Image (cartoon, helix red, strand yellow):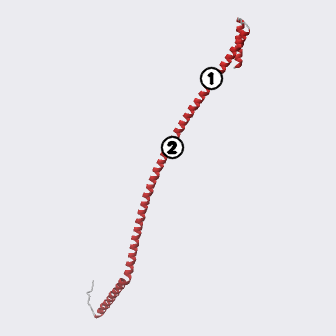
Amino acid sequence: MMIPFIASDSEASVVDVQLLTLGTAIVVFIIFFVLAAKFVWPQILKGLDERDQKLRDDLDSAEEARKQAKSALAEYEEELAKARTEAGELITKARQAAKAAAEELRSNNTRELAEMKNAATADINAAKKAAIGELHNEASTLAVAIASRILDREISSEDQQTLLSESLAELGQTK
């Protein structure tokens, strides 16, 4: 059970002391608040503003770096595409040059083979004409020799056979 509060003189002084403590606490709080508002809060706000500005600057520089990196990447990809295109063109030109060189070699070889064939044919024909000429010379020499023997004596059928055999033997020796 609770006893009802009855204020007495001794209790009144306790309440007065508590009011004095309360008043002092309020005055100290107000003085602290005023001093804090005048000296501490500006420093805290200044630090927070500087931190905020630094974060904004860092974000701006990061965004700028991202843009530069994106730009560099696009430039790199463009240069890579150009390089690939140039490489393809160089390969195409090299293939065309190789085809042209091969075709030129083929035509040169064909022409040289035709020239060699014509030269060989001409050499064969010249050798053939020379052989025929030598054969005619030998035949005429033999004919003259046969005629001179015939004129030296009268020929019988045996002489004709002998003369023919000798002529053929001489012809065989000259070959």
Return the mark for residue 97.
Answer: 2
Element type at mark 1: helix
Inspect the image, locate mark 2, and give the three-letter code of the amino acid beneath it. Ala
Q: List the residue tagged with mark 1.
A: 129
Q: Nearer the viewer, mark 2 or mark 1?
A: 1
Above or below 127: residue 94? below
Q: Looking at this rendering, what residue extends furthest in the right direction? A: 152
Element type at mark 2: helix
Residue at 38% over, 83% down: 39
Q: Residues within 10 Å of mark 1 (few under 14, many from 20)?
A: few
Q: Looking at this rendering, what residue extends furthest in the top direction? A: 156
Residue 153: horizontal and vertical position, in percent? 73, 8
Q: Earlier in the sequence, mark 2 or mark 1?
A: 2
Q: Compute the Cα span from label 2 to label 1.
A: 47 Å
Inspect the image, locate mark 1, and give the three-letter code of the amino acid beneath it. Lys
Q: Residues within 10 Å of mark 2 (few under 14, many from 20)?
A: few
Above or below 79: residue 41? below
Residue 81: horizontal and vertical position, in percent? 44, 52
Q: Quadrant of the C terminus?
A: top right
Above or below 46: residue 158? above
Residue 127: horizontal and vertical position, in percent? 63, 25
